[in-house]
Amino acid sequence: MNLIYDFLDHIDKNTYMKNNFWAYFRVSLATLPALLGYSLFFTSCVSQKEVTYFQESPDNPKRGTGMQAYIPIIQSGDVLSVVVGSLNPEANEIFNVRNLATAAHLNYSPTAAAGARLQPVGYLVDEEGNIEVPLIGKVKVDGLTTDLASKTVRTLLEKYLKEPTVAVRFVGYKISVLGEVKNPTVFVVPEERITLPEALSLAGDLTIYGRRDNVMVIREENGVRTYGKIDLTSREVFDSPFYYLHKNDVIYVEPTKAKVTSSDRTLQILPLVLSSLSVIAIILTRVF
């Protein structure tokens, strides 16, 4: 009789363990989708208002007063392209030989290619604010616009060339874009003017996790570094002094809390999922 009771007790224990296993297994299967759904719900809550650009509000005028377009000033360390034209093509080549390697840089392409930074060739503005031009020697261009620099060089060349034309342009006009954008990189700008929305467009626009109400523009001029905060969801951006970008500006797009939270929640939920799978594996080995 004792053997029969022991056998029945063993059967009851196995049945109890199996019932508990399948009960726990069903709970685990029901819990995992809930945990994943909980994570997705709280990490993808981005309202339309947070991602819409240039919104109108009672505090914002329908049309901004507009900012005066930025006109860059030549400074020490700038690299310039000086293109000279005249009735003597052979004489022109003396001045234009330094510009032959700059054409590839006068576009909106990134400055980095195949892991190497491109080095622009042109006329470097020295520490004293001068460029060295053949025949006429040093020319003071520091503090001038490119138009004024063109007129200055042309006036000096009239002694050597007949009816010369001169075009001075920036070669190393760079804008850096980083943070929550599709393609963070450094762009070389061919024109002397570019706006913040244009630069962000070149970087592929902001990702869904980029904060449009708190875009930072870092600007350094004359040894002074300034930080501007731009709200792209407001039309007041058109009146901001940071709407027109200056050469060597850095744009940083801050991630939203949802991006940070998604990373944190993944780290929190993953151990729970792994623990559930581990418990299931342990029960399987003991029951079966």
Image: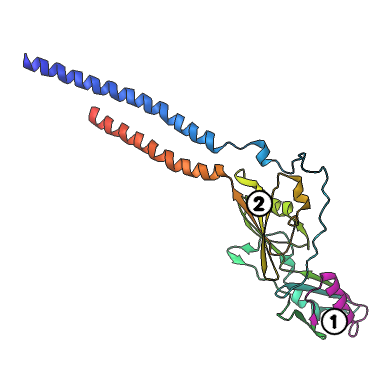
Q: Is residue 199 magenta?
A: no
Vertical placement of 17 versus 35: above or below? above
Give left or right: position of 83 versus 283: right
As drawn, which residue projects farthest toward the front?
A: 59
Q: Residue at x 16, y 20 (%)?
A: 10
Q: Residues within 10 Å of mark 2 (few under 14, many from 20)?
A: many
Disc 1 residue type (three-letter) = Ala
Residue 225: tell me if it is visible: yes
Give left or right: position of 263 versus 107: left
Mark on residue 215?
2
Q: Is residue 147 magenta?
A: yes
Disc 2 residue type (three-letter) = Val
Q: Position of residue 104 (x, y in %)?
A: 72, 66
Residue 100: tell me if it is visible: no
Q: Position of residue 282 (x, y in %)?
A: 27, 33
In the picture, the quarter occupied by the C terminus is top left
Q: Residue at x 56, y 44 (%)?
A: 257
Q: Nearer the viewer, mark 1 or mark 2?
A: 2
Mark on residue 268?
none
As drawn, which residue projects farthest toward the right?
A: 163
Q: Position of residue 140 (x, y in %)?
A: 80, 80
Give left or right: position of 21 versus 229: left
Q: How is the image coloured?
A: rainbow
Q: Secondary structure at mark 2?
A: strand
Q: Which residues are magenta?
A: 139-165
**How many angstroms separate mark 1 from mark 2 (CA)?**
49 Å
Q: Secondary structure at mark 1?
A: helix
Residue where numbered disc 1 is placed: 91
Query: Mark 1 or 2 closer to N-term?
Result: 1
Q: Where, by quadrant of the figure, is residue 50 drawn? A: top right
Q: Nearer the viewer, residue 114 or 178?
A: 178
Q: Position of residue 223 (x, y in %)?
A: 67, 71
